[in-house]
Image (cartoon, helix red, strand yellow):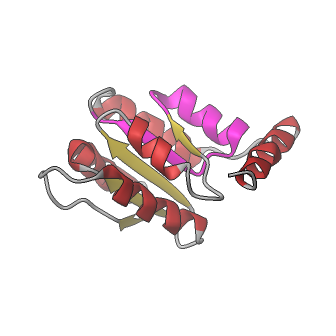
Amino acid sequence: MLVALGSDHAGRTLRLAIEAHVKQAGHEVLDLGTATTESVDYPRFATAVAEAVAGGQAVLGILVCGTGIGMSMAANRMPGIRAALCTDAFTASMARAHNDANILCLGERVVGVGVALSAVDAFLGGTFAGGRHAQRVAQLSALEKHT
């Protein structure tokens, strides 16, 4: 599976750890930056990952900033994106199973590396449960037409 990764300066260290972990798990990575620890604007990287996922270049995406909040807000502006800010493996698993999330957002200043990697594993290993959740995801998609 090809996974798009992106972060701003505040999430770069965790993103690099996630990249190594995802590759070790046998997945391919599309690293969309940042390459620097200097202050950068997170919407640029959220947009790049969201475009890769929405456009079908990547199957799933992972975004990291200081809290994960800005990345999730920015990514969710893109049609077809369901970015979920998660803090552990359970929320990441539920985001895939119940919300068909296609981008995982994490906060480097919020979760430790071990918790983050567990969330990544749960997210990448998860599948959408469908059923009653499908109608809710369809309702989310319908909201895109109103923006």
| The quadrant where residue 27 appears | bottom left
**114 falls in the magenta region:** no
- Residue 39 at x, y = what percent? 16, 49
Relative to 85, is 52 above or below?
A: below
Looking at the image, residue 133 sits to the left or right of residue 72; the answer is right
Residue nearer the viewer, 19 or 9: 9
x, y percentage for residue 108? 29, 35
Against 74, is 28 above or below?
Answer: below
Q: What residue is at 65 percent from the left and 58 percent from the top? A: 80
Magenta range is 86-108
The stretch drawn in magenta includes residue 89: yes
Depth check: 131 or 138 in front? 138
Q: In this view, does 94 lie above or below 38?
A: above
Can the viewer see residue 134 in this picture? yes
Q: Where is residue 68 in the image (x, y as percent from the top left)?
A: 39, 37
- Horizontal arrangement in the rendering, residue 57 relative to residue 71 (left or right): right
Question: What residue is rendered at 29% in x and 49% in y?
Answer: 15
Q: Give me the residue at 46% from left, 36% from top.
A: 119
Question: In the rendered view, does 76 fall on the left or right side of 135?
Answer: left
Q: Does the image show residue 1?
A: no
Quarter of the image holding residue 98?
A: top right
Q: Residue 41: x, y in percent?
A: 28, 53
